[in-house]
Amino acid sequence: MTVPQITFDWDAILRDRVLPILGVTSGGVSQPTWTFVCGQPGSGKTTRIAQLAAKLGPDRCQIISGDALCFLLPELFRDPGNPALVDALTEYEREVQPAQIDALLTRATTLRAHVLHEVHVPVGVAKRAAQARAAGYRVACEVLALPPQESWLATLRRDADAAFTDRGFAKTVAWDRLLLSHHRWPAFLAWAEDKLIFDSLRILGRDGEVLFENTNELTDDQRHWTGPAFAFESLLVERLPPRSPAQRQALVADWQALRAHPAVAFQNHPAWTHAAIMALGEHLQSACTDPTYGFDLNHPPVPPDPQAAAGWTARLRADLIATLTSIEAQDQAALPARGDRLLALVATLMAQPAA
């Protein structure tokens, strides 16, 4: 039996909701910047965009966020399992939201406003970067570095709370989906460095601290980086930050509170399965007693802790192997050798006495 489908007036939604609520209101910036704020779900992109908007002037910044656009359609997302919404959801994902983003960007470039573009997977970024440069924008890329378990815990907290509000849009990010996003960014950065598609690259911590930065400049019609192309390596390393015993215990406490949340407890949601939730807790609890998670590559312990160093290196190697299997790594023949050089560099740093 065919289920009658609910239809939407997408033109009216763009006119009456998207542009008035999300569209930038002013501009006039002589040299606007188009910043891609990137990372897996829960890495801190929304927080970083708020920091940038406050610095640049909120009224002169066009924020592009898929979540913000979905938030404007509670009647579509409040009941995503409704069989009468299947066609509308498909149409929205494939055609409507991209068209809404295009409309917001057209307004922004016409007004000469800054663009803050949130991205969780590196799809279409190169095309948008070329569009930005053609429009006279300075093109920046910032990637948030955070361990995937901490990112997933952050998304679980956010989305479990949202499920019990009237905001009408609560995502459910599955662990596998988040991990897939996590592993795609390093290889994308290696490609982006090689192709010089950005004017600047930054690796940031979740609170916005700059962990790596590089810029490129135009000399005699040739672009080149002003510093070593090291964003690929930096992202891999910075996603393994040292955590104090107190920080690790706090993550366990967050997980314990989350496990009892009514949106999670005994629900076994397809994206938040009981097995995945419990596996997260087991990982966080084991990290509390594992010296690997307190190891600091920049300040190795004195006297040396071979067990912690070996464990940290094993985590880096596992992340590197997963990165090399990502779709972004497939056409980069030199990437495995670059990974080997990173591991050799890490081994050298670990062998050096502390300053």
Image (spheres, helix red, strand yellow):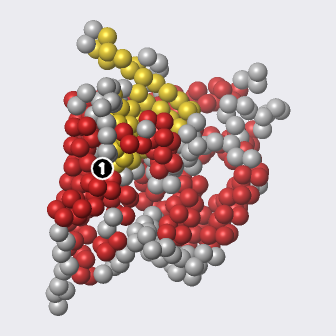
**Residue 170 visible in the snapshot:** yes
x and y, in percent, of residue 344 in the image: 57, 28
Instruction: Tell me the crowding category of disc 1: few under 14, some 14 to 19, or many 20 or more residues within 10 angstroms, Cα based.
Output: many
| 153 or 346: nearer the viewer | 153
Image quadrant where residue 135 sits: top left
Above or below — where is 174 with respect to 329? below
Indicate the secondary structure of the residue bearing disc 1.
loop
Tell me the quadrant of the picture where the C terminus can be found: top right
Mark 1 residue type: Gly
x and y, in percent, of residue 168 in the image: 40, 72
Residue occupying image coordinates x 29% and y 55% = 20
Residue occupying image coordinates x 74% and y 58% = 249
**Left or right of 227, for residue 34:** left
**Residue 323 visible in the snapshot:** no
| 306 or 181: nearer the viewer | 181
Q: Hey, which residue is sitting farthest top in the picture? A: 220
Q: Hey, which residue is sitting farthest bottom in the picture? A: 1
x and y, in percent, of residue 76 in the image: 30, 72
Residue occupying image coordinates x 40% and y 69% = 169
x and y, in percent, of residue 163 in the image: 48, 73
Residue occupying image coordinates x 23% and y 67% = 90
**Left or right of 308, for residue 124:** left
**Left or right of 24, for residue 230:** right
How many dots with numbers? 1
Tell me the quadrant of the picture where the N terminus can be found: bottom left
Q: Hey, which residue is sitting farthest right in the picture? A: 303
Which residue corresponds to mark 1? 23
Above or below — where is 77 with respect to 228? below
